[in-house]
Image: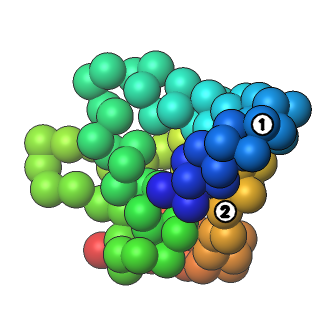
Amino acid sequence: MAPMVDQMESCRAENLKEARRIAGLLYKLHHFVHEDKVHHNLRYKIAAWLRGRIPSPYMRPPMPPPGREEVLTMREVLKGAGFSVISNEEIDATLNNRI
């Protein structure tokens, strides 16, 4: 939400260069989350987990567990949009220690 507010404030201040820069970052995030129409809810959960908002990225069956590549891509997209994310060690600990 914060980057969206920054984008709107940039538009109101007529700083279109900054507004376009933020829009480009948000576009990459939005595109990645919604490119897979079947599992976009899983990607929302991965994003919440990577931001430290929830303890696990796993959903109840029959939803598949997140793939490592999907998690790492989401991490990079979130970082590229200016969000803080959990460490690689936390990612490895969660993905490697699933019961």
Are there few (<14), some (14-19), or many (20+) residues within 10 Å of tag 2?
Answer: some
Residue drawn at point x = 52 percent, y = 32 percent:
30
- What's the amino acid at mark 2? Phe
Against 6, residue 30 (above or below) is: above
Residue drawn at point x = 42 percent, y = 63 percent:
48
Are there few (<14), some (14-19), or many (20+) residues within 10 Å of tag 1?
Answer: few
- Residue under label 2, please give it: 83
Q: Nearer the viewer, residue 63 or 6?
A: 6
Indicate which disc, 2 or 1, sits on the residue closer to the N terminus: 1
- What's the amino acid at mark 1? Glu
Against 41, residue 99 (above or below) is: below
- The mark lying in front, picked from 2 and 1, is 1
Q: Is residue 3 left or right of residue 55?
A: right
Q: How many tags in the picture?
A: 2
Distance between mark 2 and mark 1 Cα atoms: 24 Å
Instruction: Measuring from the top left, give residue 18's x and y in whole percent.
Output: 83, 40
